[in-house]
């Protein structure tokens, strides 16, 4: 009988995708000939998707083996590779800008091919993978159809919400034109996933553009959250569940306080408002304060979870936090995820750690914890070792590349020789 003395660890943020030519088998036949013409001239834009570690995205047995060696038993899978007829990874906000109706049609074909590949990839490891499927916002009816297909087919990771920044060609997320999509997700119990970095626009393709894109990521992620809350989406659809992944979590209490302050100020009728804003009608239809919507409907995918973030877990809600490793990205905690878990959750009661490491993700994405328990007893971190933490001086220098260890490794540890990561993009 299992002793239940080890944690079940589910990563709520991993990435995968097919090799470019693998997608061919999943395309509608009407697009195969055009795919062949497109693919033979396509150049993969990411250097770390060209080497031997690129196969981590699609090699099922390798992936299971490496994740188990890292103490991770199950995963929520976001996209990573470039699907047919895209120029970059579809996770990027660039999927929002389409040049023509034909471009939109072909990108839809590419995303559907990815979704169908993803379904088979998840079926290859029953109970271990929850695939996040993709849609585009330019055709809401098509998005609704894809949500229904994915739910019926058995993809349990929910839908990835594309970016809708200025210049994307689609309305902001609070626009009523999306209500049919929100209603469908709410009725079918499909989580809406907002992944960090997909909310903002790209200003160009130079290194300088890249720098500003990276610096602005968090502000755009927060703006998307504001649109969903203050724009009335969560009010109109109280059963809708939203997950904010790889955006950090330390900002959440501060942002909720700020939004509550604005909300209370514009609602003030006694002349004692903290700020002047003659537009209280903009939030007339909101029945709750922003922080109340958060606690009712929102969750945080805590990729690279840091001890400083764990310190505000009660303000965020222990039932709202889902740990993530970001495998197989370069900055992922792999192959040091056990140490990352020990570092973040040192001193956290076992009952709370269990929620953060697996319970919340199981509830959100339908993982069967009893199914995962047997594997956990072989490879999961022990309760005591997580509670007691880890000596970071024993980690190789390359562990410092993961934000989970930011500012925590000593100089001697950072300068030790080591090159064990070798992780693809």
Image (tube, helix red, strand yellow):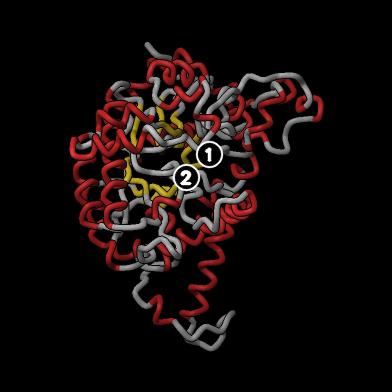
- In x, y percent, where is residue 102? 27, 53
Residue of label 2:
245
At x 41%, y 37%, the residue is 82
Q: Which of marks 2 and 1 is nearer the N terminus?
A: 2
Closer to us: 167 or 185: 167
At x 26%, y 62%, the residue is 179
- Element on which disc 2 rests: strand
Side of 79 where 238 appears, left or right: left
Residue 338 visible within the image: no
At x 27%, y 39%, the residue is 34
Q: How crowded is mark 1: few (under 14 residues within 10 Å), some or many (20 or more)?
A: many
- In x, y percent, where is residue 110? 30, 41
Residue of label 1:
303
Q: Residues within 10 Å of mark 2 (few under 14, many from 20)?
A: many
How far separated are the C-alphas under marks 2 and 1?
Answer: 7 Å
> CB under 8 Å between callouts 2 and 1?
yes
Quadrant in the picture for the N terminus: top left
Q: Residue furthest right?
A: 412
- In x, y percent, where is residue 386? 58, 26
Is 235 above or below relative to 382? below
Side of 43 where 275 appears, left or right: right
The numbered dot on residue 56 is none
Residue 35 visible within the image: yes
Occupied quadrant, residue 130 = top left
- In x, y percent, where is residue 293? 41, 60
- Element on which disc 1 rests: strand
At x 34%, y 63%, the residue is 233
Closer to us: 274 or 61: 61
């Amino acid at each position: 009988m299992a002793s239940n003395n080890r944690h079940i660890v589910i990563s709520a943020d991993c990435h995968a995708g097919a090799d470019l030519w693998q997608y061919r088998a999943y395309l509608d036949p009407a697009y195969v000939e055009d795919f062949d013409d497109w693919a033979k001239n396509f150049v993969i834009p990411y250097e770390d998707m060209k080497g031997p570690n690129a196969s981590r995205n699609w090699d099922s047995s390798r992936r299971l083996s490496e994740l188990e060696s890292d103490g991770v038993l199950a995963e929520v899978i976001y996209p990573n590779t470039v699907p047919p007829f895209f120029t970059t990874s579809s996770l990027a906000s660039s999927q929002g800008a389409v040049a023509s109706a034909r471009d939109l049609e072909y990108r839809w074909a590419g995303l559907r091919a990815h979704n169908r590949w993803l379904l088979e990839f998840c079926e290859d490891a029953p109970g271990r993978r929850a695939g996040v499927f993709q849609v585009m916002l330019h055709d809401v009816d098509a998005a609704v159809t894809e949500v229904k297909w994915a739910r019926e087919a058995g993809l349990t990771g929910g839908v990835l919400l594309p970016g809708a920044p200025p210049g994307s060609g689609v309305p902001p997320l609070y626009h009523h034109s999306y209500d049919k999509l929100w209603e469908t997700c709410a009725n079918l119990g499909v989580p809406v996933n907002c992944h960090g970095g997909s909310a903002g626009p790209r200003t160009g393709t130079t290194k300088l553009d890249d720098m500003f894109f990276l610096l602005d990521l968090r502000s755009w992620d927060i703006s998307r959250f504001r649109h969903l809350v203050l724009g009335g989406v969560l009010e109109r659809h109280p059963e809708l569940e939203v997950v904010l992944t790889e955006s950090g979590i330390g900002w959440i209490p501060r942002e909720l306080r700020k939004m509550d302050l604005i909300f209370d100020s514009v609602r003030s009728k006694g002349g004692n408002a903290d700020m002047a804003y003659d537009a209280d009608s903009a939030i007339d239809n909101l029945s709750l304060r922003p922080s109340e919507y958060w606690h009712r409907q929102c969750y945080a995918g805590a990729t690279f979870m840091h001890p400083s973030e764990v310190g505000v877990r009660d303000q965020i809600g222990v039932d709202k936090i889902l740990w993530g490793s970001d495998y197989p990205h370069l900055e992922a905690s792999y192959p040091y995820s056990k140490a990352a878990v020990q570092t973040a959750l040192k001193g956290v009661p076992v009952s709370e750690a269990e929620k953060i490491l697996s319970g919340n993700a199981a509830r959100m994405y339908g993982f069967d914890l009893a199914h995962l328990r047997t594997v956990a007893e072989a490879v999961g971190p022990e309760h005591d070792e997580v509670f007691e933490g880890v000596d970071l001086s024993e980690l190789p220098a390359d562990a410092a590349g993961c934000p989970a260890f930011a500012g925590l490794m000593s100089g001697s540890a950072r300068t030790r020789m080591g090159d064990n990561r070798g992780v693809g993009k």
